[in-house]
Amino acid sequence: IQEGKFETGGVQFFRVVGNGTHFRGYVNKEMAVHGHDDAPESGAIGLRIEGEGSILISKIELSQLK
């Protein structure tokens, strides 16, 4: 998985898609990371945010892919 830093300003859009063994991450609707790994077991999910400052989350959606 790639890691990196970027400067933000204003509203940001993040999307994470995991479909079996295929994973993609988007920042502002542009793919930022893509990879393949073992399929995760069913269970809980988490959101990890690091750094200093404030964050306002306006919406979180979960959808099961068919």
Image: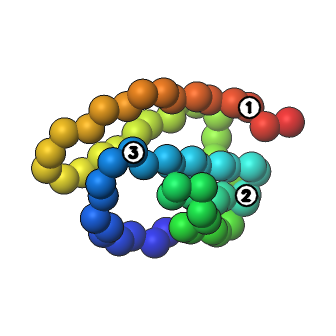
**Which residue is depicted at the point 73% across and 58% down?**
21
Residue type, numbered disc 1: Gln
**Which residue is depicted at the point 50% across and 48% down?**
14
The disc placed on residue 11 is 3
Whole-percent x and y of residue 22? 72, 59
Read off the residue under disc 2: 21
| Mark 1 or mark 3, whichever is nearer to me | 3
The residues tagged by marks 2 and 3 sit, at their Cα atoms, a distance apart of 30 Å
Q: Nearer the viewer, residue 26 or 36?
A: 26
**Left or right placement of residue 38 versus residue 12 in this view:** right
N-terminal of the two: label 1 or label 2? 2
Look at the numbered discs 1 and 2 and tell me whether their residues touch, using CB distance below 8 Å: no
| Label 3 residue SS | loop
Residue type, numbered disc 2: Thr
The residues tagged by marks 1 and 3 sit, at their Cα atoms, a distance apart of 26 Å
Q: Is residue 37 visible?
A: no
Quarter-of-image position of residue 34 = bottom right
N-terminal of the two: label 2 or label 3? 3
Q: Is residue 51 above or below residue 44?
A: below
Residue type, numbered disc 3: Val
Whole-percent x and y of residue 32? 54, 67
| Label 1 residue SS | loop
- Badge 1 local density, few (<14 within 10 Å), some, or many (20+)? few
Quarter-of-image position of residue 30 = bottom right
Q: Nearer the viewer, residue 6 or 11?
A: 11
**Left or right placement of residue 31 versus residue 57 in this view:** right
Read off the residue under disc 1: 64
**Which residue is depicted at the point 49% across and 47% down?**
13
Whole-percent x and y of residue 45? 50, 35
Q: Nearer the viewer, residue 1 or 12?
A: 12
